[in-house]
Image (cartoon, rainbow, N blue to C red):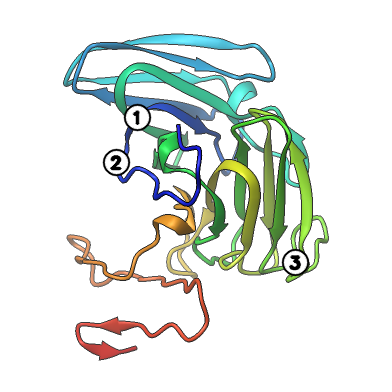
Amino acid sequence: LLLSLSVFPSQTTEGTEFWVTYLNNNNESGLILKLIVSSRNDGNVHIENPQTGWSADLAVKANTIGEFQVPVSQGYTSVGAVVENRGLKVTSTTPIALYASNYYEFTYDATIVLPITGLGDEYVIQTFESEVRDREFAIVATEDNTIVSITPHATTSDGRVAGKSFDISLQEGQTYLVTSNSGELSGSYVKSNKLISVFAGHVCATIPDGNAACDHIVEQQLPTVMWGKNFALTKTYGQTGDYIRVTALKDNTNIVLNGSNV
């Protein structure tokens, strides 16, 4: 367990404790939420919602993939600006790698879930800007009496003003969803007094804008303590190009691509 945020979190995606929630997708009817687990060893995975008392178990075999369907009522953060009991704690008897998938017909995405050793108390939201549907990010508390300060980059759907911070109070396993139907949420700042898990994305984005159909997108956010300065990128196979989004943590950040300032 990470006790001091002055120490770098573990730089592995394997672990024995995780916190996850699911972002609002295009439609709740017919939604399929899954946890996807893999492990190097046999083990048992326990999934629980600390606020509702719901729980389930999954046996995992070494070097295989295990899947579990999560009830929508337990892990789906569908209502913005409301504290919900939709955070899931996942623990395992052996180190596992964990993914969370959010499926609705014709719109689907999945994200890797970081272990608690990869969480932090400071985040800057990174997501994709699309003019269709809502931009969004969700926060999961890992402990009771968690106070989170949120500074949205755009005016939120419930009228929170861009650039003005506000606080929310969460208990273990509670979640809070921030949405905007009018502006870019990338660059929103999130600071907490305790470890939190943060997921960001879009209800259903068109990439690029103007496409006839949209898709749900989601990615767990890295705490700023895990940000870096050097990255290797490769083009997606079969595509003419990719979007690269860069977010600066500090002023006067210089970005260099293949030796040239951009």
Mark 1: amino acid: Gly
- 170 or 112: which is nearer to us? 170
At horizontal 39% and vertical 50% (from top left) the residue drawn is 8
State whether residue 105 is above or below residue 161.
above
Name the residue tied to disc 3: 155
Residue type for callout 2:
Thr
Q: Residues within 10 Å of mark 1 (few under 14, many from 20)?
A: many
Quick check: can you spot residue 237?
A: yes
Camera-side mark, 1 or 3: 1
Rounded to the nearest whole Å, what is the CA distance between mark 3 and mark 2?
35 Å
- Give left or right: position of 42 versus 149: left
Q: What residue did someone put label 1 on?
A: 15
Contact check, label 1 and label 3, Cβ < 8 Å: no
- Residue at x 50% of width, y 43% of height: 4
- Mark 2, secondary structure of its residue: loop
Q: Nearer the viewer, mark 3 or mark 2?
A: 2
Q: The residue under label 3 is which amino acid type?
A: Thr
Counting other residues with Cα less than 10 Å from the Cα at mark 2, is it few (<14), some (14-19), or many (20 or more)? few
Residue that label 2 marks? 12
In this picture, residue 52 sits left or right of residue 130: right
Q: Quadrant of the C terminus?
A: bottom left
